[in-house]
């Protein structure tokens, strides 16, 4: 049981990274980017494909992922949120179109959508502590996500640029009056969100020793779920929710059997979401929160 | 050229699902979960004709009822939220429903052979059309007849009181409430109707495909249905018709772009949203829903 919980923590770390990406795009920028997971998947996929084609080792996969991922994220953000500017829901629909197109492009790529293997230098290396086997890569993923979360929280709260991003997201007009370039802030925040996503995608691929087409949708759904569980107010809540979900999923699947993990997981989230409007009495009129 | 008999059922089923999304979009919300009700209808219809030997018409009515009931249950909560939360909840609903479909296992013996859904192995042998000697031409006629029925039904819905109330609620819920329109009840009625339409489409799909499994009701199915409606526009019921025609007839039927159909379709949606955000069949005055 404890063993499973520790594995769950590693997954929770991944969820936290995905949740942070959505926190930056939705919580800070108020953008709903449904192509987020697919863009990450595409970047890692292409990174892995190019690296294996050229015979490069695992650090190159990360570098290639970033080389593909950051420009791609900026392009998607430009198309969906700058060119499509009529309505937030239209922008969301545009990200859907991008999602479909990217997935198909991966299917038509030389990799044909098959899983691309990613070498994991830490495969089968484990620590033994108190009779528990702990995979080193899992520990690293958890540490990486916690460090990233702390860095982003510090960045948004303390740094000049981080504060400027928040002002800019709060009200572009005020930002302009303060001499902040709204566009530049959006670009910087998009790059950070993309960077976090690439770290998540790459570490997931390393832990699984492979990346495939399914990761895209999975990442988007998990990221959104974390966003809902953790809320958009605080990074601490996001990380807590992510770690909680990771552990609950693993432990839950051990208790009730792997086959029921997703059923129970989605069922609980649905129940939580369904009960929520009845719990907040004062503001439950439809039409708000738009 | 396109084989009309072959493509009509696919077109009709896609259109029915798009009409279901259209009804939800009319209330000002985007649902990515209509495939859940589509699936509920498919399983209900398939079970009734194969395991209980029902006729097609009552089975399809029960399919629609299955869609409506499941939509009404989740709608009680869903119609109280809006915007991002609404969309997200439908997304989770869709994924949850898919997991439920994987678990449906109910076998019985009919006509000397085992029938019924087999959990992860899917639900095969829904061969009502084959057993009753209904040929491809007749199948196409049934499918297109049902699609026309749904188009007319949704059109009538928009023309009558509930439809007008729905437009008012979508425009401004507070204002609608101040003229004695109950926003929650209005939206719930629309959502339940959308569930019924999706369920009917699902019942048709099960009999057309003869084999269904959980992956037939994945998120992409719901996303496509929304995309058809957005592509076509929300101004009238012709919007979903236009959007479905564009994808099924031109991209799928004529294979204009070959294997890159989804790339073309995805790019088309983005291009439309940039250049022509009201869709192919747009309004002159009204903006987005």
Image (cartoon, coloured by chain):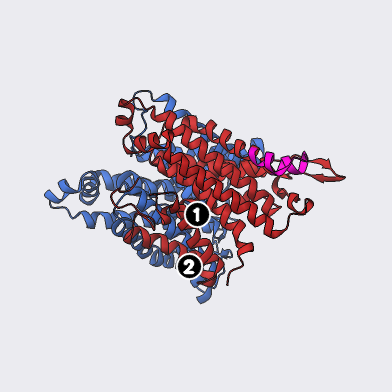
Chain colours: A blue, B red
Residue B51 belongs to the span the image colors magenta: yes
Q: Chain of mark 2?
A: A
**Image mark for residue B224:** 1
Q: What residue is shown at x 31% (from left), y 35% (from top)?
A: B172
Q: Are marks 1 and 2 on the same chain?
A: no
Picture layout, residue A239 above or below residue A111: above
Picture coordinates of residue B133, whole percent (x, y): 77, 54
Q: Nearer the viewer, residue A9 or A218?
A: A218
Residue B44 belongs to the span the image colors magenta: no
Picture layout, residue A28 above or below residue B190: below
Q: Nearer the viewer, residue A45 or A169?
A: A169
* Quadrant housing residue B203: top right
Q: Chain of mark 1?
A: B
Q: Is residue A38 left or right of residue B35?
A: left
Q: Disc 1 versus disc 2: distance between alpha carbons? A: 26 Å
* Quadrant housing residue B66: top right
Picture layout, residue A101 above or below residue B68: below
Q: Disc 1 vs disc 2: which is toward the camera?
A: 1
Q: How many numbered discs, if any?
A: 2
Picture coordinates of residue A203, whole percent (x, y): 48, 56
Dots 1 and 2: beta carbons under 8 Å?
A: no
Picture coordinates of residue A151, whole percent (x, y): 33, 48
Q: Nearer the viewer, residue B243 or A127?
A: B243
Q: Is residue B69 left or right of residue A243?
A: right
Q: Is residue A122 left or right of residue A196?
A: right
Q: Quadrant of the C terminus of chain A?
A: top left
Q: Nearer the viewer, residue B269 or B119?
A: B269
Q: Residue furthest bottom?
A: A54
Q: What residue is shown at x 42% (from left), y 52% (from top)?
A: A34
User: Which residue does the numbered mark 2 point to in the structure image?
Assistant: A46
* Disc 1 element: helix
Which segment is the magenta one?
B46-61
């Amino acid at each position: 049981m404890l063993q499973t919980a520790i594995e769950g923590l590693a997954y929770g770390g991944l969820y936290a990274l995905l949740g942070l990406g959505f926190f930056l795009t939705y919580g800070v920028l108020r953008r709903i980017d449904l192509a987020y997971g697919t863009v990450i998947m595409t970047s890692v996929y292409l990174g892995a494909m190019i690296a294996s084609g050229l015979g490069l080792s695992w650090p190159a996969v990360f570098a290639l992922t970033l080389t593909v991922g950051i420009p791609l994220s900026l392009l998607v953000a430009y198309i969906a949120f700058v060119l499509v500017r009529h309505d937030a829901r239209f922008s969301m629909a545009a990200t859907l179109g991008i999602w479909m197109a990217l997935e198909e492009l991966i299917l038509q790529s030389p990799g044909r959508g098959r899983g691309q293997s990613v070498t994991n230098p830490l495969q089968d290396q484990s620590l033994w502590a108190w009779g528990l086997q702990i995979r080193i890569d899992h520990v690293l993923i958890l540490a990486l996500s916690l460090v990233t979360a702390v860095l982003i929280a510090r960045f948004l709260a303390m740094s000049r640029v981080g504060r400027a991003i928040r002002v800019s997201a709060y009200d572009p007009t005020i930002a302009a009056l303060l001499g902040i370039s709204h566009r530049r802030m959006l670009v910087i925040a998009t790059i950070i969100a993309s960077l976090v996503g690439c770290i998540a995608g790459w570490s997931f691929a390393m832990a699984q020793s492979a990346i495939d087409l399914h990761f895209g949708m999975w990442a988007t759904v998990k990221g959104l779920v974390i966003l809902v569980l953790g809320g958009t107010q605080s990074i601490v809540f996001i990380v807590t929710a992510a770690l909680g979900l990771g552990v609950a999923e693993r432990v839950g699947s051990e208790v009730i059997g792997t086959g029921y993990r997703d059923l129970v997981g989605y069922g609980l989230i649905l129940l939580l979401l369904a009960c929520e409007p009845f719990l907040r009495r004062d503001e439950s009129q439809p039409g708000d929160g738009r | 050229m396109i084989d009309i008999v072959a493509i009509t059922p696919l077109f009709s089923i896609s259109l029915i699902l798009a009409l279901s999304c259209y009804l939800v979009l009319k209330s000002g919300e985007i649902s990515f979960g209509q495939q859940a009700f589509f699936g509920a209808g498919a399983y209900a219809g398939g079970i009734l004709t194969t395991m209980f030997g029902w006729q097609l018409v009552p089975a399809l009515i029960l399919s629609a009822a299955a869609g409506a009931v499941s939509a009404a249950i989740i709608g009680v909560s869903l119609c109280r939220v809006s915007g991002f939360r609404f969309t997200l909840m439908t997304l989770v609903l869709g994924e949850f429903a898919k997991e439920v479909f994987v678990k449906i296992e109910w076998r019985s013996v009919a006509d000397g052979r085992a029938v019924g859904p087999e959990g992860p192995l899917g639900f095969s042998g829904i061969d009502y059309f084959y057993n009753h000697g209904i040929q491809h031409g007749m199948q196409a006629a049934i499918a297109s007849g049902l699609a026309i029925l749904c188009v007319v039904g949704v059109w009538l819905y928009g023309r009558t009181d509930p439809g007008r109330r729905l437009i008012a609620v979508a425009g401004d819920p507070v204002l609608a409430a101040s003229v004695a329109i109950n926003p929650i009840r209005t939206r719930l009625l629309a959502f339940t109707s959308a569930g019924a339409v999706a369920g009917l489409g699902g019942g048709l799909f099960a009999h057309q495909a003869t084999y269904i499994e959980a992956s037939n009701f994945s998120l992409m199915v719901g996303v496509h249905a929304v995309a058809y409606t957005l592509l076509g526009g929300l101004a009238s019921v012709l919007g979903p018709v236009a959007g479905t025609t564009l994808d099924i007839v031109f991209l799928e039927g004529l294979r204009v772009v070959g294997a890159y159909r989804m790339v073309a379709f995805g790019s088309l949606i983005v291009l439309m949203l940039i250049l022509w955000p009201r869709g192919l069949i747009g309004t002159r005055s009204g903006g987005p829903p």
